[in-house]
């Protein structure tokens, strides 16, 4: 996503907007992050990576 830092939200794909939202929530130490696909078949490899990262954060006891 580094190449997209100058883009406005409307210039990002839906998946990119979702990833930015999750990143923003994590940076702001959100107590809860809800991440569920609209349709299970729509989880791409990058979506699966996001879920794995969230699982790792959860296993570590959250953010410090």
Image (cartoon, rainbow, N blue to C red):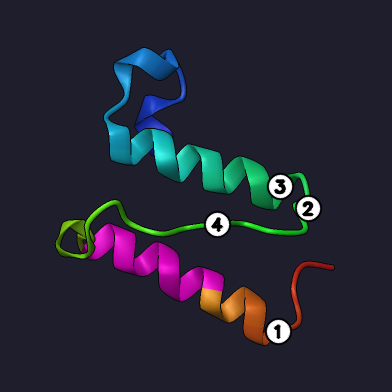
Residue at screen point 77% across, 67% down? 63
Disc 3 to disc 4, C-alpha distance: 15 Å
**Around disc 1, counting alpha carbons within 10 Å, would you say few (fewer than 14), some (14 to 19), or many (20 or more)?**
few
Q: CA distance from mark 1 to mark 3?
A: 16 Å
Q: Furthest-bottom residue in view?
A: 59
Residue 53 shown in magenta: yes
Residue lying furthest right? 64
Residue 22 in percent (x, y) is at 54, 48
Q: Nearer the viewer, mark 3 or mark 4?
A: 4
Mark 3, residue position:
27
Where is mark 2, residue-wise?
29
Sort mark 3 into few (<14), some (14-19) or many (20+) by Cα contacts within 10 Å.
Answer: few
| Mark 2 vs mark 4: in front | 4
In terms of sequence position, does the residue under pointer 3 or pointer 4 come before the other?
3
Residue 27 included in the magenta stretch of the image = no
* Range covered by the magenta-colored residues: 45-54
Residue at (42% x, 18% y) in the render: 9
- Vertically, is 7 above or below 5? above
- The kind of secondary structure element at disc 3 is helix
Which residue in the structure is indicated by mark 1? 60
Marks 2 and 3 sit apart, C-alpha to C-alpha, by 5 Å
């Amino acid at each position: 996503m580094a190449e997209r830092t100058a883009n406005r939200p409307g210039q990002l794909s839906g998946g990119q907007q979702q990833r930015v939202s999750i990143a923003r929530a994590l940076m702001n130490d959100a107590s809860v992050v809800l991440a569920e696909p609209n349709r299970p078949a729509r989880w791409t490899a990058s979506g699966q990576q996001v879920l794995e990262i969230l699982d790792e954060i959860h296993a570590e006891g959250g953010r410090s």
